Image: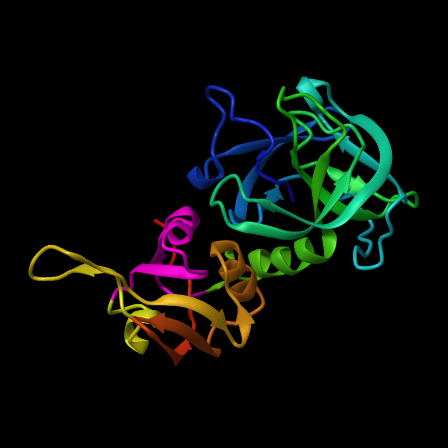
Amino acid sequence: MRSKASGRRRKPGEKSMSGHGGWKVTLADQTTYDAKVVGFDQDKDVAVLRVDAPKDKLRPIPVGVSADLLVGQKVYAIGNPFGLDHTLTTGVISGLRREISSAATGRPIQDVIQTDAAINPGNSGGPLLDSSGNLIGINTAIYSPSGASSGVGFSIPVDTVSGIVNQLVKFGKVTRPILGIKFAPDQSVEQLGVSGVLVLDAPANGPAGKAGLQPTKRDAYGRLVLGDIITSVNGKKVTNGSDLYRILDQCKVGETVTVEVLRGDHKEKIPVLLEPKPDES
C-alpha cells in the first residue's frame, strides 16, 4: 500500500493514481516488479497495489495499533526523500488527532499523527513505525513553506488505513456516504452572518434532493433566493464544510440521518437516506 504524494507535486511524467496505468515496485534487493492498482481512496490519500512478485520476496510488515499512541513516543519514518532510496529518519510523535485536508479532494482527514521525524518530498507513502517496528501510520504530507522538512510531518493512522485497505482489497473502492449537495464556500456563509452550510444545489436524483432540501436559486426577477442552511446532522452542530464531512465520515451508506436546516426564518428537521458516493469516471 502507498499513499499518493500529497506532500509534494507530481513530477513531469509521473503518473496519477486515477490513470490506473502500469506501475513498477522496486524491493530492497533492487529487483523490480510490475504492479497494478487494486483501488485507491483519494479522500484519505491511500492506495493498494498488487505486486507481481514471488511470495518469498514479499514480507508483510507487522501492523500495529494507532489508537493508543502517546505524544513523545519514538517513531521511525522510511521513504525515498529527494530520490534517496530506503532512507530512515527518526523522531517522536508531536501531536495526535490533528486534522489536515486531502490534497486531492479537499476533504478533511481526521485523527492524523503529527511527527517531527524528517519527512520530505518523496517520503509520502512510506511507513511510520513504532520502536518495535510495527506499522502505525502512512506518511502523507509535510507542513513547510519552503517544501523541505520543517519538523512538522503528518501520517494517516494505521487504524484508519486498515479499514480503507480492507474495502479496497474486497471491492476495489471505498464506499462512503454522501448527502448529494453542492455547498457554498465557508467565507460566503460567514458574510451572511449565519453559521452552517449553505446548499447551492441538491440534484433531484440525490439523497438531499429526494428528501426535499432546497437549493439556492433565482426568482422570476433574477434575485437570489438562498437555499437551506444546514446547521446540524443527527444533533451534531455543523458550522462549516469540514464539520459536515467529519459527521458523514462517521455515518454509513443506507443510514437515515436527521438534517436540521435554517429555511428562511424558521428551522426544519428533514430525514435524509444516505447513498453511496457514485463511481468517479
Image spot of residue 263 (x, y percent): 32, 72
Q: What residue appears at the point 29 percent right and 71 percent down from the top-left corner? A: 264
Quick check: 84 left or right of 238? right
Q: Nearer the viewer, residue 186 or 48?
A: 186
Residue 222 location, x and y as percent? 10, 55
The answer to whether one can see residue 60 in this image is: no
- Outermost residue on the left side: it is 220
Residue 280 in the magenta stretch? The answer is no
In this view, the residue in front, 142 or 128, is: 142
| Image quadrant in which the N terminus is located | top right
Does the rendering let one see residue 244? yes
At 39% from the left and 72% from the top, the residue drawn is 261
Q: Residue at x 63, y 19 (%)?
A: 146
Q: Is residue 160 left or right of residue 202?
A: right
Question: Magenta includes 182?
Answer: yes
Residue segment shown in magenta: 178-203
Estimate the x, y position of residue 249 in percent, counting from the top left.
55, 63
Image quarter of residue 131 = top right
Image quarter for residue 73?
top right
Q: How many marks?
A: 0
- Quadrant assignment, res 5: top right
